[in-house]
Each structure stands twice: as structure tokens, then as C-alpha cells.
Amino acid sequence: MYQYGALSQTRRRNGKLAQITAFTFIAAVGLYIFYIDNDIIKRLQPILTTLQFQNSNTGSKDDADEEDDGLYKGVYPNSLITLFYPYTLLRDVVLAQPVSDSDIPFFWHLHGSDERTMKRILTTCFGLELVELDDLDSIERAKETGLVATLDRYKHVITSPHIRPICEIFTVDHFARMFSFFRHPLDYDLHPALPTFEETDNWLTRYLSDLHEGDITFKQLGVAKHVVRECTVVGTLDKMRGSILRIKAYFGWEYADGMTDFAGERCVDDALAEEPVEETWIDHGGVEWDEHYAMNRYDCEVYEIAQSAWRAQNCSLHPYDIQLGRKKMLDEQEAKDKAKWESTDKSDELKYIEDEGKGKRRKRFGIF
């Protein structure tokens, strides 16, 4: 007993010494920061100013301030929703399978040859109706009238060379399912309705990130890659036929006029043969390539991510009937699991009531 009492006193004394030591150390560091090293305060000043600005955004605002905020600021100026808006109205084409009946197909055609070829295939080979929104006025009218709520995803496809304005016509009740074709910057054939910028470098990255002036960085490249990798059923110039057949299977479209698969694929081949597009090849070890890459490095990376996404989607995008089959299987398994847990909970509850009636105390955790 004596030894136990001495040991307890020693532990209490050591604990007090540890607390005093820790308090002394913290106080010394605080004194050093706030009274000795004024340079630290100076270095922290920009961060403190930024935090104060962000906190002020979360406070109450008058009507004038709310008007000045616009679409891209608001109370969370640095959130991902703000960064990727309006691309948040595009479905994730991989994770959000199967394709919902409320989603509307959207063909974003950057290049003139892609537009002509794909529109012919959509109408002639697949029997779909096109809703062409090639100018900003028609896009604004579609937004005002709630056009997307009147469309049937099995019959209609919205087409446009514009992407940021067109995204704003969609809603959380009717998201867009986008597909598009990408090509190397050497082969750009930009649609005449698309804007041109004073800065002539990296057009696609600037367009997708909405930064038309000044230097672009990896932040803008990240936005562009996000759109390609997550929001687009990707097609590429060098794999047009395979891309088109994958898009058809993904959306669950049928060939027009009861055409067989052989006749439908022949229809696709004829449309592709009518306006073939040859890729541009230059020596990657020459001066011409060095100059081109120096000016369009980010667009070259967007093209590479498009090629990577195409290969990945070869495994991750499934024909519509397989999408439905997997959803049915998962729903059935979820229903079984739910029934199992409900049955287990009910039996446990009945057992508890029975034990209570017999005056027994159930032991759940060890001896308790």
C-alpha cells in the first residue's frame, strides 16, 4: 500500500511538471511571434486580409452588392461549384450511368467538318431531330422559354458550337449529356460562330476556362481537362467511326427506318466518306513543331487527355441496355440487403422485448 501511494504521488508530480513545461514553451513561442519577429506578421498580413475579405462575403449584403456579385462570385467565391460553373449542369458521363430519361443529349461541335458529318449521321442514320442553337440569341430564347423541359432524349439532340452559354439552358431537372469530337491543334477547323481572342495561343483552353486575356496557367488547363474527361462522351478525329458507334450505343439510339446493324453502319461509313478529314503530320524534332508546341502547349495537353479519356471510356462507358441491366442488378441487391437488415433489426427488437418480459438483462458489450 505504501509503495502504491508513493507511486501515485510521483505520477501527479510528473504530470504537473509536464503541464508547466508545455505552458512555458507555448508562451515563449507566442511571445517570440507577436513581440520579437515582426517579419512574420508582415508575411501573414496578405493571408489575414484575404480571410477577412472572404468572411465579409458571408455576411449580409444589400441588393446592390448582390447585383455586383453576378454568377461567378457569391458567398463562396473559391468553391468548386463557382470554379466549374456552368459545367456543373453537364452530367458526369461515367459515374452517372445509366443515362437518365430526363437528360438531354447535347452535341458540342467545335469544328465545321465534324458538325456537317455528325448532323447528317444523327438525322439520316439515327432518325433524330436536331435542335440547332448556333447563335447566342437562339440560346437566350431557349433559356427563357424552358426549351429543355419540352424535349425527349430519345428523339431530340441539341447542337451548338457554344458551350458555356448553352450549359445555362439546362437545369437540375434536365441535365445535359454532352458528346463532342476533339482533334490536335494543328487540325483545328473552328466553327465560324465561335469567338476569336487577341491572344492567339491555346484557343481551346482559353475558351473552356473563359480566360480570354493574359497568361493562362494550370488552373485554366485543369478546367479544360475536367470538361473533357468527366463531362464528355469523347470522340476523336482519328477514330471517328468507333466514336460514333460508341455514342449511339451509350445513348441507346436505334438506326432509322428499321435499318439493320449492317445497313446502319453502312450509312455511317457513307457519311464519313463524303467529307474525309486528313490529319496534319509534322516532324516533332523540327523547328516548326517546337514553335507550335511553345504556343499551344496547353491545347496539346487537352488533346492528349481527350485521347486518354477515349481509351478509358472504352472500358467505362457501356451500351444503354447493359447500363440498365447493371442498375437492375444493383437495385435487386440493395433491396435484398435492406430486407435482410430490417429482418435482423426486427428479430433483435423482439428478442429484447422477450428478455425484458422475463426480467433478463441482455449483455451487449463484454460484461456490461
Image (spheres, helix red, strand yellow):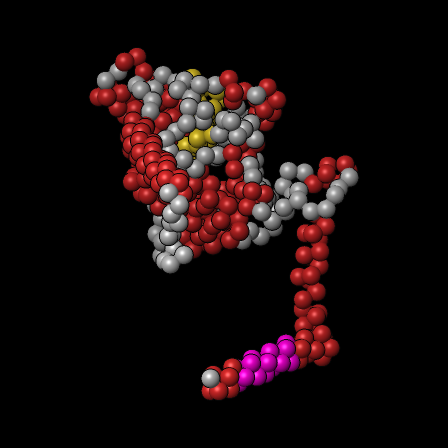
Q: What residue lies at 41% left-to-right and 17% top-to-bottom?
A: 155
Q: Is residue 151 left or right of residue 41?
A: left
Residue 309 position, x and y percent, is 36, 43
Q: Does the stretch in magenta take in 293?
A: no
**Residue 169 appears in the figure:** yes
Task: Return the x and y of residue 152 as percentages of the image width and height.
Answer: 44, 18
| Front residue of this view, candidates 359 and 321 | 359
On the picture, is 177 further left or further right than 146? left
Q: Is residue 13 magenta?
A: yes
The image shows residue 294 at horizontal and vertical percentages of 47, 54
| Residue toward you, 339 or 3 | 3
Magenta stretch: helix, strand or loop mostly: helix
Name the image quarter holding residue 18.
bottom right
Residue located at (34% from left, 22% from top): 253
Task: Specify start and end residues of the magenta stretch as a single range.
Answer: 9-26
Q: Looking at the rendering, which quadrant does residue 243 occupy?
A: top left
Quadrant containing the C terminus in the rendered view? bottom left
In-front residue for pair 248/46? 46
In the picture, measured across the screen, residue 105 lies left or right of residue 142, that is left
Q: Residue furthest top?
A: 257
Vertical comparison of 255 with 33: above or below:
above
Viewer-closest of 306 and 17: 17
Residue furthest front as drawn: 359
Q: How many marks?
A: 0
32 to 84, vertically: above or below: below
Q: Residue drawn at (31%, 31%), measured in percent from left and top?
A: 332
Q: Residue at x 27, y 20 (%)?
A: 264
